[in-house]
Image (cartoon, helix red, strand yellow):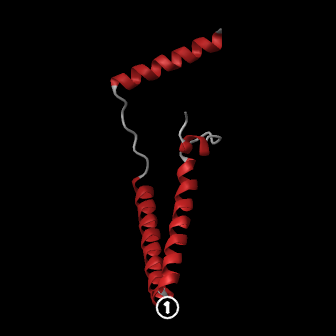
Amino acid sequence: MKSIWSTLYDNVKDRRYAVLFFAPLAVLACLAIVGGIAEDLGAFEHIAAWLPWAGGLAAAWALVWVARAIRRARKRRREGWERKELSSDEMRAARSKLMRDRNRNRA
């Protein structure tokens, strides 16, 4: 018998996309539960007072993330491509693959 999780998202070829589907779904469910509890407690007035601060922190985090990405890209561009020598095992495997492919094309 298959588990419910394997049958729920079975038609997708690449299973890594399941995280992109289930993570926001779980977050929305949690937010709905927390929102219902907060409404019962009357906490929305207190939450609304902190929303500008939370938005400012999120914007600052995004700016830092973008700045780091730009610095990383500039550093990578300055360094250029580094060619590393292949080990003897890697060279042997590459030659073997090339010879195999050449023999297939002849046949």
| Residue with the mark numbered 1 | 45
Q: Please tell me in which quadrant of the rendered image residue 77 appears.
A: bottom left
Task: Say if 27 sits above or below 43 in the image.
Answer: above
- Residue 32 pos. (x, y %): 55, 71
SS for tag 1?
A: helix
Q: Residue furthest top?
A: 107
> Measuring 36% from the left and 33% from the top, which residue is drawn there?
85
Q: Amino acid at mark 1?
A: Glu
- Residue 19 pos. (x, y %): 53, 52
Task: Say if 48 sits above or below 93 in the image.
Answer: below
For the question of whether residue 48 can be seen, the reply is yes
Q: Residue furthest front?
A: 40
Looking at the rendering, in which quadrant would you find the C terminus? top right
| In the image: residue 61, left or right of residue 16 | left
> Measuring 52% from the left and 60% from the top, which residue is drawn there?
26
> Measuring 45% from the left and 89% from the top, which residue is drawn there?
46
Could you say which is closer to the camera, residue 21 or residue 104?
A: 21
Count neighbours of disc 1 (C-alpha within 10 A) and say few if under 14, some if 14 to 19, many if 20 or more: few
**How many numbered discs, if any?**
1
Q: Please tell me in which quadrant of the rendered image residue 4 appears.
A: top right
